[in-house]
Image: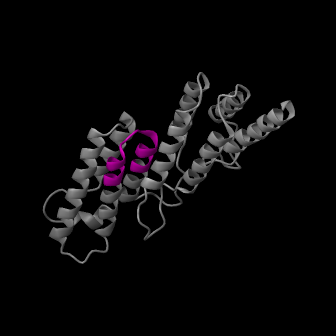
Amino acid sequence: MKSKRKAIISSAILMATSIISSSAFVKAQDEPNPVKEKFQDDLKAAVMNESITVAQLKEIKENLAILKEAKSERQPGAAVDLMTPYSAVTKIRATMATIKEPDRTTLRQDFQLVMATKQPEPSAEPDTPGKKLGKDIFAAVMHGEPTPPQVQQLQDSLNSLESIKTSGGGMLEKFRAMKTAKSQIEETMNTGSFRPEDKQAVLDDLNNLGGKGGGGGGLRRQGL
C-alpha cells in the first residue's frame, strides 16, 4: 500500500513539473522566471500535502494545452476565437477551486499572477490599430473575469469588424457596422470584470480605430 501511494505521489510530482515546463507559460528560450518557478514549487507541495489529485492535475494540464494553442494574433482570414481559450482558463480556475486548502488559495493566486505576467509574442511587423485591438481584447479576457456572454459579444464584435474589410456594402453601411461593433465592445469593457489597465488599453484602441464622422474614409486609413 505504501509503495503504491509513493508511486502515485512520484507520478503526480512529475506531472506537476511537466505542467509548467510544457505549458503556455514557458518557451525553450525563456530565462528563469520566479513567478513560474513558484507555481511549479507550489504544485509539488500540493501533491506532497495530498491537496491535489492526479485527476485534478490532468485536468489542469489538458486545459493548459488548449491555452497553449490559442494565439492572440490569429492567422489572416481566420475567425476570432476568444471562447476556446476563455473556456480553458475558466476550467482551470474551476478545477483549482476544488483543491484542498491551504494549497487551493496559494495555487489560485499563483495561476492568476502567471496569467497577469504572460506577454504576447511580438509581431514581426508593426500592429495596425485593428490588430492591436484584437490583441488587447484577448489579453483583457485572459487576465479578467468576464462572463461567457460578454466574451461571446467581444468575439462577435471583433469578427464583425473583420468582416467589414470584405463586405460588399457601401462606405456608409460599413461605417455604421464599425460604429455598432465599437459601441458593443466599449459597453462590454465598461460593464465586465477586467483589469483597469486592460480596459483602458482597449478603450484607447477603439479611439485610435477611427470610424468617427460621416465620411467613412477612415476605415482604410486606420488600418482596420
The residue sitting at 20% across, 57% down in the picture is 180
Residue 76 to residue 3: above or below: below
Secondary structure, magenta segment, majority class: helix
Residue 24 spot, x, y in % from top left: 60, 48
Residue 125 to residue 40: above or below: below
Span shown in magenta? 137-154
Question: Farthest residue in the top direction?
Answer: 102
Question: Farthest residue in the right direction?
Answer: 3
Task: Tell me how many marks there are.
Answer: 0
Residue 167 spot, x, y in % from top left: 27, 74
User: Which residue is at the front of the view, 91 or 123?
Assistant: 91
Residue 209 to residue 194: above or below: below
Residue 217 spot, x, y in % from top left: 21, 67
Left or right relative to 155: residue 121: right
Residue 197 to residue 29: above or below: above
Q: Would residue 85 be seen by someone viewing this image from the given angle?
A: yes
Residue 171 spot, x, y in % from top left: 18, 71
How is colour applied across the structure in the image? Answer: one colour
Left or right relative to 53: residue 216: left
Residue 30 sits inside the magenta stretch: no
Question: Farthest residue in the front direction?
Answer: 1
User: Which residue is at the front of the view, 158 or 86?
Assistant: 86
Q: Quadrant of the N terminus?
A: top right
Question: Farthest residue in the left direction?
Answer: 214
Q: Quadrant of the C terminus?
A: bottom left
